[in-house]
Amino acid sequence: GAVVSQHPSRVICKSGTSVKIECRSLDFQATTMFWYRQFPKQSLMLMATSNEGSKATYEQGVEKDKFLINHASLTLSTLTVTSAHPEDSSFYICSARDRAWISYEQYFGPGTRLTVT
Amino acid sequence: AQKVTQAQTEISVVEKEDVTLDCVYETRDTTYYLFWYKQPPSGELVFLIRRNSFDEQNEISGRYSWNFQKSTSSFNFTITASQVVDSAVYFCALSEAKRSNYQLIWGAGTKLIIKP
């Protein structure tokens, strides 16, 4: 149980285009989903926290208009990188908290590797 | 302030050696949770263990063991008889009960290289 999927696993896009990454909780309902960004050889950096049906809370320094997060249902959150640039190339990881279970547990998706050319 | 320190950036050992990865944390909360995750080259995080602040018992799972000491604010991870498949980046993380949504505070990670 407690599986989180991400799609796509890898994406290459041209500079200036937008990319959408999906994060799904497959066998549980997620009240809260987290989006992380990880640069090579670095730790995870929390970008934003999204709660179902409400606006995402962004961490300081993360551009809201550039990284659009939508948590429209209890099983789906999306991250859209708008007008992507090469510096947005990174590994993006989502995680989800199960509304019905222990609140401190986060279940992680496999990650999406974004390359902007 | 809340903080997780993994002072070892990279460790390299020969297969079958024992290795300990250090994790030191800072928190003012009395209720908190500590985690270890493994991140192999594929990138997918693998959950290894969770410990809550009220449970200082050490844990052993096969070749893995964890030493939680509140007196020194440490939660160290030992791999016994290391194997090449243990090569990965290992992250220690802290979650505080008072922190909104139990956000995780991550250490910088330790890259473990096991040489055959």
Image (tube, rainbow, N blue to C red):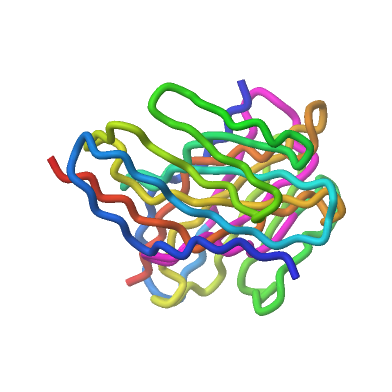
Closest to the observer: A16 or B80? Answer: B80
In what quadrant of the picture does the C terminus of chain B appear? Answer: top left
Q: Residue furthest left?
A: B116
Left or right: residue A18 compared with residue A13: right
Quadrant for the N terminus of chain B in the image: bottom right
Residue B29, compared with residue B45, is above or below; it is below
The image position of residue A93, as x and y in percent, is 53, 51
Give the image location of residue A112, x and y in percent: 45, 51
Q: Is residue A112 visible?
A: yes
A39 magenta-colored: yes
What is the residue that sits farthest to the front in this orientation? B71
**Residue B15 horizontal/vertical position (percent):** 19, 38
Report whether B43 appears left or right of B107: left
Residue at left 73%, top 56%?
A49
Report x, y in % for residue A38: 48, 62
Residue B13 lies left or right of residue B86; in this view the side is left
Magenta segment: A20-49
Comparing A103 with A20, the one in front is A103
Report the residue at 78% width, 63% height from top: A57
Choose top left, top right, bottom left or bottom right for residue A36.
bottom right
Does residue A80 lie above or below B54 as drawn? Answer: below
Residue at 61% over, 61% down: B4
Magenta portion: prevailing SS class: strand
Of residues B57 and B94, the one nearer the viewer is B57
Identify the image quadrant of residue B3. Answer: bottom right
Residue A37, visible in the rendered structure? no
Query: Which residue is found at the position 70% from the left and 72% from the top?
Result: A64
Q: Is residue B59 left or right of residue B28?
A: left
Q: Is residue A30 magenta?
A: yes
